Amino acid sequence: MLKFLLSLPHVMRGLLIDAARSLNAAVLISANTLSNWKRDASDIPVWHGFNTRNLHHLNGLEAYLDSAGFVASQLVPGLRVDRGELP
């Protein structure tokens, strides 16, 4: 039996979540997708926590949170993950 893990670029009602439901597939979202950024008076982006209001769209789906890729890519010089390297 094939099991799919679909990576979602956002958490909004639409074709991608509908496809995950029809395939009975688990979904993966980036923590960065939920990040809430606002610019301060100097126009510098400041993180203001997570925006979780759209997570209800994932109700009934097996969902995973990826929180390491971006941070790792920033902390480890030369780190690059190509799609072909993923399991």
Image: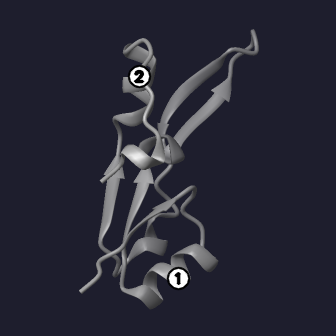
Residue shown at 36% from the left, 25% from the top = 72
Which residue sits at x=34%, y=35%? 68
The image's colour scheme reads one colour
In front here: 41 or 35? 35
Secondary structure state at the residue bearing disc 1: helix
Which part of the image, by quadrant, shows the N terminus? bottom left
- Cα–Cα span, label 1 and label 2: 32 Å
Q: Quadrant of residue 13?
A: bottom right
Image point (76%, 15%), residue name: 43
On screen, residue 1 versus residue 21, left or right, reads left
Mark 1 or mark 2: name the one nearer the start of the chain. 1
- Looking at the image, which is closer to me, 26 or 83? 83
Name the outermost residue toward the front. Answer: 84
Left or right for 59, reference 10:
left
Q: Position of residue 79 (x, y in %)?
A: 41, 22
Q: Which mark, residue 19?
A: 1
SS for callout 2: loop
Q: Quadrant of residue 55?
A: bottom left
Q: Residue at x 57, y 55 (%)?
A: 9
Q: Amino acid at mark 1?
A: Ala
Reading the image, the residue beneath label 2 is: 79
**Quadrant for the C terminus in the image:** bottom left
Instruction: Indicate the position of residue 83 as horizontal and vertical percent values.
Output: 46, 48
From the viewer's perspective, is 65 left or right of 78?
left
- Asked whether disc 1 touches disc 2, contact meaning CB atoms under 8 Å apart, the reply is no
Instruction: Identify the mark at residue 2; answer none if there is no mark.
Output: none
- Neighbor class of circle 1 (other Cα within 10 Å; few <14, some 14-19, many 20+) is few
Three-letter code, disc 2: Leu
Residue that protrudes farthest toward the left in the picture:
1
Dot in front, 1 or 2: 2
